[in-house]
Image: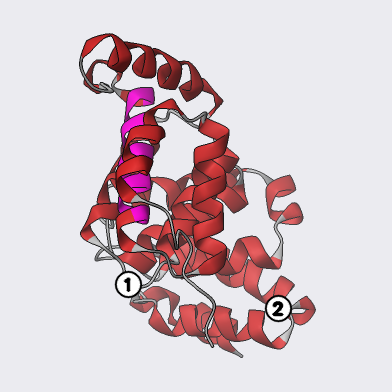
Amino acid sequence: PAPAPAGFGVEPGALRQALPWLRWREITIFANHFGQRGVVVPEVSAQVAAEIGRRLSAATAPAAFGAGSGEAGSRAASSAAEAIPNANPREVAAIALSFSKLRPQLPEYAPVYTAVATGVCSGVWEFSRLQAALIGTAFADVQLHLTDALPVVVRSVLKQLADEAAARAELTVDELRYLMHACAHLPSPGLTSEEIYLLADCTQRLVPAANFSMAAHLAVSWLRLPVPPAAKAQHQDALC
């Protein structure tokens, strides 16, 4: 028999009361567990998503944060707010990716993506290349924030690669394939010719070291890219 979904046996009412009191680390453990399992009890994942969205939103708009009313609500709000600075880029990227893996995708997960997108557009977190690529992949897979946050997170990596020879030399196959996956979902007109040249050069250099699944992932992303006429030759070279 199939394993039980994450959150099986959890009483939603008890979870709702407990969530505001949990430490940020405990909340992120829930999210990562959800992503590893892939299937979660909807009432459980929706409540955790709402709490994560609320706490991450506090990092970009503290005045919008509230954890209820009365003395108990104030203590919970204070406790949760103190945990917000610990939302580091690695955790933010892992949370976004974990929720993007859940099937089915529920509208109740939107607060997670919206809070991450707001932080991306506001420059709240400084992501590594891999973290930025994973967040871009999450937005691409759930088809949300493709016109606001996705270009910001993708082009921050592209700019670094274009400007820094060391960054290009250090780029890994994993970073490239997730970046390409995100690039394939950029809104029209997509990548510029110069960006295609850059990514084609990186692909030709790294693909010989990729295993079959990584190479296939890269090829699919290249096939999905809209290509400017001036970059068709580089596009073909990347696929060969």
Nearest-to-viewer mark from 2 and 1:
1
Determine whether the residue tagged by mark 2 lies in a helix, strand or loop.
Answer: helix
Task: State the residue in front, 46 or 158.
Answer: 46
| Residue 127 appears in the figure | no
Relative depth, front residue between 126 and 197: 126
In the picture, residue 208 is in which quadrant? bottom right
Which badge, 2 or 1, is on the more N-terminal residue? 1
Crowding at label 2, few (<14), some or many (≥20) Cα neighbours within 10 Å? Answer: many
Residue 95: x, y in percent? 48, 49
Question: Amino acid type of disc 1?
Answer: Pro
Alpha carbon distance from label 2 to label 1: 33 Å
Q: Residue at x 34, y 74 (%)?
A: 228
Label 1 residue SS: loop
Instruction: Say whether residue 89 is visible.
Output: yes
In the image, the segment drawn in magenta is: 44-59
Q: Residue furthest top?
A: 71
The C terminus, quarter of image: bottom right
175 in the magenta segment: no
* 50 inside magenta stretch: yes
Q: Which residue is mark 2?
A: 207
Point 44% across, 17% down: residue: 79
Q: Which residue is mark 1?
A: 104
Secondary structure mainly formed by the magenta segment = helix
Residue 177 at x, y percent in the picture: 58, 69
Residue 40 numbered mark, or none: none
Characterize the local packing of mark 1: few (<14), some (14-19) or many (20 or more) Cα atoms within 10 angstroms. few
Horizontal side, residue 153 vs residue 164: left or right: left
Horizontal and vertical percent position of residue 39: 44, 70
